[in-house]
Image (tube, rainbow, N blue to C red):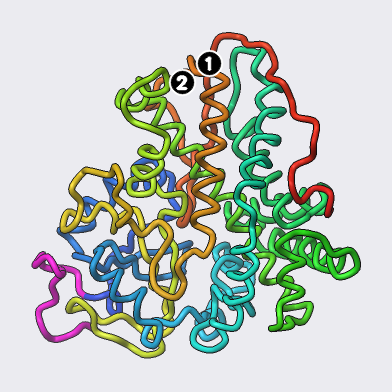
């Protein structure tokens, strides 16, 4: 079924293959190696063919619509009445082992609710995040970063994902949540399986079990941490609700944080505007972060909604209860708004906008900046160990993530380590 009128994008490009409702041609696969290798090429090819709304597959047999038009995305993200986040009707149509189900299924948490329920879940999380002492968190990042750097600074080489960004993001979120290492390790393993889409159902169960153990621990041993503050909030979540609030925070605190750090380091090590900056050039870490949030945001495609009924937008009928996925990377680079200038420009959609905008963006921004600055201050002559074009990207419909970031640098002596513990660790 296609709309009888001539469909067109907001930029006037004809949509020659009909709407996502009746997309009978091949759908763009977001989980392929080719897409992961060069998604920006894919977005450029999509625009003249489909306009702002693209028929895609999130995994084999799972159709969805990808939004690559900036203004269309704003309309959708600011209209939760027509584009709610509730996925319950959709998930009845997919098998339990669907690889993207763990990241899209309904949960009693802000991410998958709208209206009053969304407000109820979100207010407790926002209140807990707002109480984070960012000065203390700055010290926490430093006290985690320095020992990590010391494990490889004498080697002259490292993989910055496995040896730095992942363990740093992992330790920082554990500190903020008051999560002991054994529970955190199980959570990280489950989360990795969910993002990779490999044994996602098993990973989801592992992740849930770990978060349930963390909630039980914090009920019996409260501390100065986010989980305790949510438990003590007047909304009074039950155990199932608590597990889901913590699960969402944990999920956002590791994979996307790691990707933001690594994608920014990649830019700074491969672009002369920043590579020179490591040794005193003109552009800063903050400039690099702003550019990456436009060009290679850590979650490139997400902010998923499920229209309650078929809806016409940009001359295209979107089907009811089928995922509508915002391409933050595609929208940020929409020629209708992209100027190619990113310094001091925060108009990107990397944190989303509207009622589901990320409540922890200032915290995530600070952690990434501190992690990068600690590393580059310690090893200012760092360079890539392979040509930039040989770096490879992990396939997956949602993330923008390298498989590794190998670097070389002059062998350096260990940095002095502060003796006091990172904030939140005593609570675990």
Q: How crowded is mark 1: few (under 14 residues within 10 Å), some or many (20 or more)?
A: some
Residue 207, percent from left and from top:
73, 61
Secondary element type, mark 2: strand
As drawn, 186 above or below 305: above
Q: Name the residue under label 1.
A: 408
From the viewer's side, name the closer residue of 222 and 117. Answer: 222
Q: Dot 2 corresponds to which residue? A: 384
Question: Between 88 and 96, which is closer to the camera in this rendering?
Answer: 88
Q: Residue 53: percent from the left, percent from the top?
A: 26, 68
From this view, report whether residue 128 is shown above or below residue 132: below
Quarter of the image holding residue 288?
top left
Query: Where does residue 153 sit, x and y in percent of width and height?
Result: 64, 17
In this picture, which residue range is highlighted in magenta?
1-18
211 displayed left or right of 312 = right
Check disc 2: other Cα within 10 Å, few if <14, some if 14-19, many if 20+: some
The circle on residue 46 is none
Contact, mark 2 vs mark 1 (Cβ under 8 Å): yes
Task: Determine whether, in the image, residue 143 is placed left or right of residue 293.
Answer: right
Give the residue at x 68% y 19%: 415
Q: Which residue is drawn at 49% across and 48% down?
A: 365
Under circle 1, the secondary element is strand
Q: Is residue 351 highlighted in magenta? A: no
Residue at horizontal 31 percent and vertical 67 percent from the top: 55
Query: Split into 4 quadrants, where in the image is the N terminus?
Result: bottom left
Q: Where is residue 400 in the image (x, y as percent from the top left)?
A: 45, 47
Residue 141 is left or right of residue 352, and the answer is: right
Q: Distance between the residues labelled 2 and 1?
A: 6 Å
Q: Nearer the viewer, residue 381 or 202?
A: 381
Q: Is residue 261 left or right of residue 174?
A: left
Q: Name the residue: 36% across, 45% down.
A: 290
Q: Does the magenta stretch include residue 2?
A: yes
Q: In this view, does 425 lie above or below 92?
A: above
């Amino acid at each position: 079924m296609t709309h009888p009128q001539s469909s067109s994008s907001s930029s006037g490009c004809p949509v020659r293959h009909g709407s996502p409702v009746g997309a009978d041609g091949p759908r763009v696969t977001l989980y392929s190696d080719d897409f992961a290798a060069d998604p920006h090429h894919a977005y450029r090819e999509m625009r003249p063919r489909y306009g702002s709304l693209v028929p895609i597959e999130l995994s084999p047999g799972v159709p969805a619509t990808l939004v690559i038009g900036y203004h269309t995305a704003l309309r959708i993200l600011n209209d939760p009445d027509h584009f709610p986040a509730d996925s319950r009707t959709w998930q009845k149509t997919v098998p339990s082992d669907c690889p993207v189900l763990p990241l899209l299924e309904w949960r009693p948490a802000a991410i998958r609710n709208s209206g009053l329920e969304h407000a109820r879940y979100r207010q407790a999380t926002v209140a807990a995040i707002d109480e984070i002492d960012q000065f203390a968190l700055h010290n926490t990042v430093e006290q985690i970063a320095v020992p990590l750097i010391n494990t490889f600074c004498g080697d002259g080489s490292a993989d910055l994902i496995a040896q730095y960004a992942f363990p740093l993001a992992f330790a920082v979120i554990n500190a903020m949540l008051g999560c002991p290492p054994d529970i955190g390790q199980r959570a990280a393993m489950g989360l990795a399986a969910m993002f990779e889409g490999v044994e996602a159902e098993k990973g989801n169960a592992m992740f849930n079990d770990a978060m349930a153990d963390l909630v039980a621990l914090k009920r019996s041993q409260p501390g100065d941490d986010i989980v305790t503050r949510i438990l003590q909030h007047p909304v009074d979540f039950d155990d199932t609700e608590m597990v889901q609030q913590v699960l969402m925070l944990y999920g956002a605190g590791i994979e996307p944080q790691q990707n933001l750090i690594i994608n920014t380091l990649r830019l700074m090590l491969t672009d002369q505007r920043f590579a020179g900056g490591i040794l005193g050039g003109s552009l800063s870490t903050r400039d690099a972060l702003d550019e990456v949030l436009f060009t290679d945001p850590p979650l490139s495609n997400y902010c998923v909604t499920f229209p309650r009924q078929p809806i016409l937008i940009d001359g295209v009928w979107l089907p009811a209860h089928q995922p509508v996925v915002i391409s933050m990377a595609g929208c940020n680079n929409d020629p209708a708004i992209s100027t190619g200038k990113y310094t001091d420009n925060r108009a990107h959609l990397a944190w989303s906008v509207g009622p589901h905008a990320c409540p922890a963006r200032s915290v995530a921004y600070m952690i990434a900046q501190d992690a990068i600055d600690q590393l580059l201050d310690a090893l200012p002559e760092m360079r890539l160990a392979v040509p930039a074009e040989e770096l490879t990207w992990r396939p997956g419909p949602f993330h923008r993530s390298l498989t590794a970031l190998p670097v070389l640098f002059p062998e350096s002596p260990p940095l002095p380590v502060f003796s006091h513990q990172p904030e939140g660790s005593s609570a675990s």
